Image (tube, grey):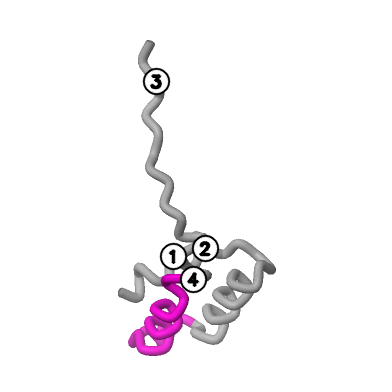
Amino acid sequence: MKQKEVGFPVPIRHWLKDELYDWSVRLIQESPTDYLFNKAQIMKLLENHVNNKADTSRKLWTILTFMI
C-alpha cells in the first residue's frame, strides 16, 4: 500500500515568537521596502502573533521572505 507523501512541517509559528523574533523586527525595520509595505502594520501583525491574539505566521513569513 502506497502512502500519500507528507510535507515536512516547519514550526515557523513558534520560531517567530522566539528564535526569529529579533531577526524579524530588524528585517522589517531595515528592509528598503517602505514604498511597498506599511511597516507599522507589519509590526502590528508580528506583535499580535507574539501576544497570541492571532496566528499571522503565514502572512508574516511571506512578507519576511519577500523583504529578504
Comes first in the chain, label 2 or label 4:
4
Q: What separation in Å lies between label 3 and label 1 (alpha carbons)?
A: 29 Å
Which comes before the other along the chain, label 2 or label 3? 3
Q: CA distance from mark 4 to mark 1?
A: 14 Å
Q: Amino acid at mark 2?
A: Ser
Look at label 4 and name its amino acid.
Answer: Asp
Residue ID for mark 1: 61
Q: Quadrant of the C terminus?
A: bottom left
Checking the image for residue 19, the label placed there is none
Marks 4 and 1 close (CB-CB < 8 Å): no
Mark 4 is surrounded, within 10 Å at the Cα level, by few (under 14), some (14 to 19) or many (20 or more) other residues, namely few
The residue labelled by disc 2 is: 57
Q: Label 1 is placed on what type of residue?
A: Trp
Q: Are marks 1 and 2 in contact (CB under 8 Å)?
A: yes
Q: Residue at x 35, y 75 (%)?
A: 67
Residue 10 image offset from top left, x and y in percent: 41, 52
**Measured from the top left, where is residue 36 in percent x and y?**
42, 81
Please tell me whether mark 4 sits on a helix, a strand or a loop.
loop
Q: Is residue 51 left or right of residue 65?
A: right
Give the Cα distance between marks 2 and 4.
Answer: 12 Å
What's the distance in space between the residues labelled 2 and 3, CA to CA? 29 Å
Q: Residue at x 59, y 80 (%)?
A: 44
**For marks 4 and 3 on the same chain, the one whose residue lies earlier in the sequence:** 3
Tell me the residue that label 3 is attached to: 3
Q: Are marks 2 and 3 in contact (CB under 8 Å)?
A: no
Instruction: Determine whether the residue tagged by mark 2 lies in a helix, strand or loop.
Output: helix
Circle 1 packing at 10 Å, graded few (<14), some (14-19), many (20+), is some
- Which residue is identified by label 4? 18
Q: Position of residue 58 (x, y in %)?
A: 50, 60
